[in-house]
Image (cartoon, rainbow, N blue to C red):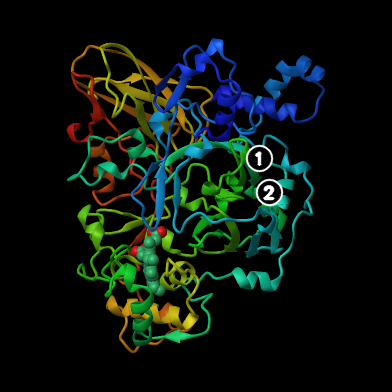
């Protein structure tokens, strides 16, 4: 590593536009001086140009307009933030699902050329880390911690052959349909911007933070 | 493969020598290249017709990937056209003149940047690997560990490039990240509008937005015209075709960080936001489908890498893990980058197993499959980094030896 930090230090020195002559004469000294700089985590940046000599702003780019942000800001969050107007139920969603999703995911969400979406044979249990074969039982009902993710993902990426083609009501409908098929909501539950975040997913409390944190221990 | 230039060469320089050719591995050589003028300069170079490396394609699926043929490479860098691919709804075709990066949410100044804007900022360079979190899961379905698999088939969702771009911290300063902001959503401009949540701390640390790969514009497969680069972290977060970044005080819980890219543990929980790639290595020669024609001196060679920093050592066992010797590391050894290793081996001609294990700057030692499963349980598919043994039989045939090493 010391060889490498030496190189990074050398690059930093040459970037300061000293004359070649100066660099050649001062090189051994400057290498020492630069070596004593704290080694940057990103060997390209911090040692290249000290950020302190930068202007507060480069004045590059432009202010984003309200309308261009609204046009692209489609993400939906666990608290329901970002959900559009509209609503749907399992009944309204069943029709959309049959015509726009079933071909790839199976008539009842059992899976086909694309992922399985429905199934609760593990109940409220979470056995996925216990055996490799149980991974095939991962579904929205058994594995997904947030209902908002289902809206967000369907809205942005599905149906895969025509992404972004569903109306908000259609997305709400298939979301309701898939939650109903997974025994999470009842058939008459109206999914909309006020109710989706109330849906409690069976796997909601199963997720834990990464505890590897760079120690030498295998985890 | 040679196209019009080859046709040009053969008509202009038609000669007796050219007529006597020796075909070999797809190429046709002059009988005596010193007796016939060669091909003239061309706008674009091409590989020797005798070299035909290619990405390893999975059977066509709706959601695609291809792997780098690690066995075809040497040194440290991955040629851009052999960089692995993983995308969820195909490769978008983006006009660089219409490209826009939108930054908003918990920032002082919501802003839009063109590609020219991004390139005008002070540039930064980083040579590092990108590895898919699902790379190398081959040993986990223990009922089905194959033996006739190449290094690329095992670990080819790994590639190394020199990237040029703008440090994320430079843009953070420009838009003024609010003190409350702790995460940002990175969103791609592909048909999956792929999203991941990234902690702001990574942006202040070493993240960047890359627009160059190995000296030229980034390839469409790798995110043209601009992608997120998070050195050492799982590939899926390094959003390609990056179009939007939204800052918030909590993660967004997208599909790719909940339903996928989480790691079930044996205590009925699952690890979420497991970003770092653990230390790992694989011998790329000798490996399946090589056959060593005779005993004697052979140089074992491969790649080691860690998302936590630099590789400090690679150890080689040529006796099925009984004894270990340090391998030579190719310099420079870079942080969060692959490191080529080599080790001279005098094969006696007896059956044996070759193994490599990487050690990184945190002291972490690449585990065996047994150690890995003891720590992680049998239900993990992402972040698999156990030792990859190769079996050499007395005929010199090399096969993947994971099933036979305990």
Q: Locate the C terminus of chain B and report the quarter of the image it occupies.
A: top left
Q: Quadrant of residue B323?
A: top left
- Residue displayed at 28% across by 29% down: B288
Task: Out of A140 and B249, give the one closest to the viewer.
Answer: A140
Residue B284 image position (x, y, % from top left):
36, 28
Q: Nearer the viewer, residue A157 or A188?
A: A157
Q: Residue drawn at (27%, 35%), measured in percent from left and top?
A: B368
In the image, residue B384 lies at what x, y percent? 33, 43
- Name the side, left or right, on which A104 lies relative to A122: right
Q: Residues within 10 Å of mark 2 (few under 14, many from 20)?
A: many
Contact flag, marks 2 and 1 (Cβ < 8 Å): yes
Q: Residue at x 43, y 55 (%)?
A: B273
Residue B148's label in the rendered image is: none
Q: Count the numbered circles shown.
A: 2
- The span from disc 2 to disc 1 (Cα, nearest Å) is 10 Å
Q: Earlier in the sequence, mark 2 or mark 1?
A: 1
| Closer to us: B20 or B347 | B20
Kind of element beneath mark 1: strand
Does residue B224 appear left or right of residue A120 in this picture?
right
Relative to B60, residue B367 above or below: above
| Above or below: residue A96 compared with residue A144 | below
Instruction: Name the residue tied to disc 2.
Output: B170
Please give the chain letter of the residue carrying mark 1.
Answer: B
Residue picked out by circle 1 = B124
């Amino acid at each position: 590593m010391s060889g490498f930090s030496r190189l990074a230090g050398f690059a930093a020195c040459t970037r300061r536009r000293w004359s070649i002559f100066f660099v050649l004469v001062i090189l051994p000294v400057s290498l020492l001086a630069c070596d004593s700089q704290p080694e940057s985590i990103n060997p390209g940046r911090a040692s290249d140009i000290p950020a302190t000599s930068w202007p507060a702003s480069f004045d590059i780019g432009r202010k984003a307009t309200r309308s261009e942000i609204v046009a692209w800001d489609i993400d939906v969050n666990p608290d329901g933030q970002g959900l559009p107007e509209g609503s749907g139920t399992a009944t309204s969603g069943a029709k959309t699902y049959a015509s726009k999703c079933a071909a790839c995911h199976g008539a009842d969400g059992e899976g086909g050329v694309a992922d399985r979406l429905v199934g609760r044979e593990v109940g409220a249990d979470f056995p996925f880390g216990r055996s490799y074969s149980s991974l095939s039982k991962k579904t929205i009902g058994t594995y997904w911690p947030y209902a908002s993710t289902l809206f967000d993902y369907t809205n942005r990426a599905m149906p895969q052959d025509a992404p972004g083609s569903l109306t908000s009501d259609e997305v709400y409908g298939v979301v309701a349909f898939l939650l109903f098929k997974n025994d999470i909501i009842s058939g008459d539950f109206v999914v909309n911007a006020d109710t989706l975040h109330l849906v409690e997913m069976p796997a909601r409390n199963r997720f834990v933070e990464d505890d590897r944190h760079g120690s030498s221990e295998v985890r | 493969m040679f196209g019009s230039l080859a046709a040009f060469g053969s008509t202009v320089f038609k000669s007796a020598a050219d007529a006597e050719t020796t075909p070999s591995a797809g190429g046709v050589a002059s009988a005596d290249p010193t007796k016939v003028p060669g091909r003239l300069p061309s706008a674009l170079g091409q590989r020797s017709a005798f070299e035909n490396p290619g990405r390893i394609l999975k059977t066509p699926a709706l959601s695609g990937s291809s792997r780098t043929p690690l066995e075809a490479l040497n040194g440290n860098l991955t040629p851009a056209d052999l960089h692995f691919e993983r995308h969820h709804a195909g490769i978008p075709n983006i006009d660089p003149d219409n490209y826009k990066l939108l930054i908003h949410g918990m920032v002082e100044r919501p802003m839009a940047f063109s590609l020219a804007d991004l390139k005008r900022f002070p540039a930064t360079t980083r040579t590092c690997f990108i590895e898919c979190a699902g790379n190398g899961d081959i040993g986990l379905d223990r009922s089905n560990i194959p033996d006739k698999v190449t290094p690329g088939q095992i670990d080819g969702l790994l590639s190394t490039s020199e990237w040029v771009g703008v440090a994320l911290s430079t843009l953070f300063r420009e838009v003024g990240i609010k003190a409350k902001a702790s995460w940002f959503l990175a969103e791609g401009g592909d048909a999956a509008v792929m999203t991941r949540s990234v902690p702001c701390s990574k942006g202040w640390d070493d993240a960047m937005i890359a627009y160059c790969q190995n000296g030229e514009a980034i390839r469409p497969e790798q995110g043209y015209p601009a992608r997120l680069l998070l050195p050492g972290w799982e590939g899926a977060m390094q959003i390609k075709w990056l179009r939007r970044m939204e800052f918030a005080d909590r993660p967004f819980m997208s599909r790719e960080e909940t339903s996928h890219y989480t790691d079930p543990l044996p205590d009925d929980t699952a690890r979420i936001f497991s970003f770092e790639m653990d230390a790992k290595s694989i011998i790329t020669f000798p490996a399946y489908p090589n056959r060593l024609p005779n005993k004697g001196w052979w140089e074992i060679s491969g790649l080691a890498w860690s998302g936590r920093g630099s590789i400090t050592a690679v150890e080689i066992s040529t006796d099925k893990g009984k004894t270990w010797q340090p391998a030579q590391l190719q310099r420079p050894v870079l942080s969060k980058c692959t490191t080529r290793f080599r080790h001279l081996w005098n094969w006696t001609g007896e059956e044996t197993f070759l193994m490599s294990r990487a050690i990184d700057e945190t002291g972490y030692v690449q585990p065996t499959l047994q150690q890995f499963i003891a720590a992680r349980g049998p239900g993990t598919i992402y972040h698999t980094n156990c030792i990859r043994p190769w079996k050499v039989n007395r005929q010199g045939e090399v096969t993947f030896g994971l099933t036979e090493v305990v």
